[in-house]
Amino acid sequence: MLRLVVLGAAAGGGVPQWNCGCAVCRAARTSHPEIRNSQASVAVSADDANWFLINASPDLRQQVTQTPQLHPKPGALRHSPIAGVILTNGEIDAVTGLLSMRESSPFSIHAHPKVLAILRSNNIFDVLKEETVKRVPIVIDVPFRPLLQDGTPSGLEITAFAVSGTSAWYLRDKQHPGGSSSTGDTLGLRIEDVDSGQYAYVIAACADVDFDLKTRLKGAPLVLFDGTVWRDDEMIQAGLGNKTGQSMGHIAMSGESGAIKQLADLGIGRKIFLHINNSNPAWLHASPERQTLEREGWEIPAEGMEIVL
C-alpha cells in the first residue's frame, strides 16, 4: 500500500506566521487553534516502516516529533525511519529542514542537479557529510526507485517532471549556482507503490496548469497541489506585501486560470491543497472561499493527516 502523511500544509512562515497579524493568523492564535499548520512537507512510504520526505521544511523537527511513524524504533539509541528526502525545489521552505538532520544518520537527498548545485554552493549544508548523506541527482521524466539506508529497495517508484515555476526567491537577480537553464527549479512528483501500483501526485509549487500537466493528472487517485493563494493579488489587497502569486511562481486557487477550474473534470479521485499561505482566507472554515473549494471537491489537510491508497 502507498501511505502518505501530510506533515504540514502551510507556505513559508506557517500558520500563524511569527510576525503576522492578518485575520487568519489572529484566528489561529486565538479562536481557531485547529487551523494552526506548519510549513509544507509530506512523508511517503510503501511499507509503513521506512519513509521518504517530500521536501524538508523549516518545521521538520517539530513535524517529526509529532509524527509517530517517524520516531526512532523502540530500544534504539540512534535510529530514524527516514530513508531519504526528495526535493522538488530549492526554496527555503523546502531545504532548510535538512539542517535539522545533521546528526550523522544515513539518508539520501534526491534533487535535480540545479537544486543540488544550490546546496553545494552554500557551505552550511556541508554539515550533511556526503559519506553519510548521499546526494542523488534526479533526471526529469526518468523513473527511479529510491533505496533504503542499507541499499535495499524501498518499494517506491518516483517520476519527477518539470512544472511551470521560478527559481528560488533568494536567487532572483543573482547568478544561479546550477546554471541558466530554466528547467529543474520546480518539479512535480508521481509516487507509486511498486507492488500495488497505487500512485499519487505531489506538486508543492506550480505557476500554471498546462495541457501536459492536465494529461498527467487525469484519472489520478490522489493529487496534492499548490494552493498558495486564493487570488493572485491576495497579498497586495490584504496589505501584506507587494508580490503576486504568479511572481512567486504559484498559481491561484480561484479564477478562470486557477487550480480549481483548471483541474476540474479530470476524474481525479481526491484533491488536496498544499503549501497554503497565511494570507489565504480558505484557511477559515466558515469563509466563502473554504466553502467554495470544498464544494468543488478540494480539501485543506490538518497536520498529521494520513492517506492510504
Image (spheres, rainbow, N blue to C red):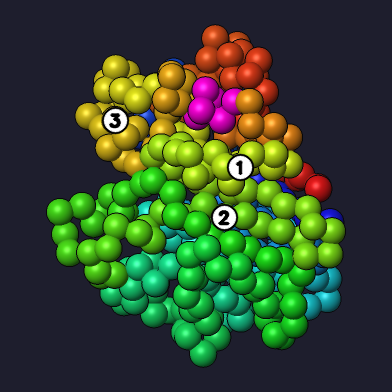
Percent from the top left, x then y, of residue 130? 47, 85
Q: Nearer the viewer, mark 2 or mark 3?
A: 2
- Which residue is tagged 3? 244
Q: Farthest residue toward the left?
A: 173
Percent from the top left, x then y, of residue 36? 57, 33
- Which residue is tagged 2? 189
Q: Nearer the viewer, mark 1 or mark 2?
A: 1
Percent from the top left, x then y, of residue 33? 61, 27
Identify whether 282 is placed above or below 286: below
Residue type at numbered disc 3: Thr
**Is residue 261 shown left or right of residue 250?**
right
Identify whether 47 is placed above or below 283: below
Q: Which residues are magenta?
A: 259-264
- Image quadrant containing the N terminus: bottom right
Examine the structure image and report whether residue 261 is included in the region drawn in magenta. yes
User: Between 122 and 243, which is closer to the camera in this rendering?
Assistant: 243
Q: Which residue appears at 71% of the width and 85% of the height? A: 150
Q: Secondary structure at mark 1?
A: helix
Q: How many residues crowd around disc 3 within 10 Å: few (fewer than 14), some, or many (20 or more)?
A: some
Q: Kindly report the distance in space between the C-alpha atoms of the residues bearing marks 1 and 2.
A: 11 Å
- Which residue is tagged 1? 217
Residue type at numbered disc 1: Leu
Q: Nearer the viewer, mark 3 or mark 1?
A: 1
Q: Which residue appears at 48% of the width and 65% of the height? A: 140
Q: Kindly report the distance in space between the C-alpha atoms of the residues bearing marks 2 and 3.
A: 25 Å
Q: Secondary structure at mark 3?
A: loop
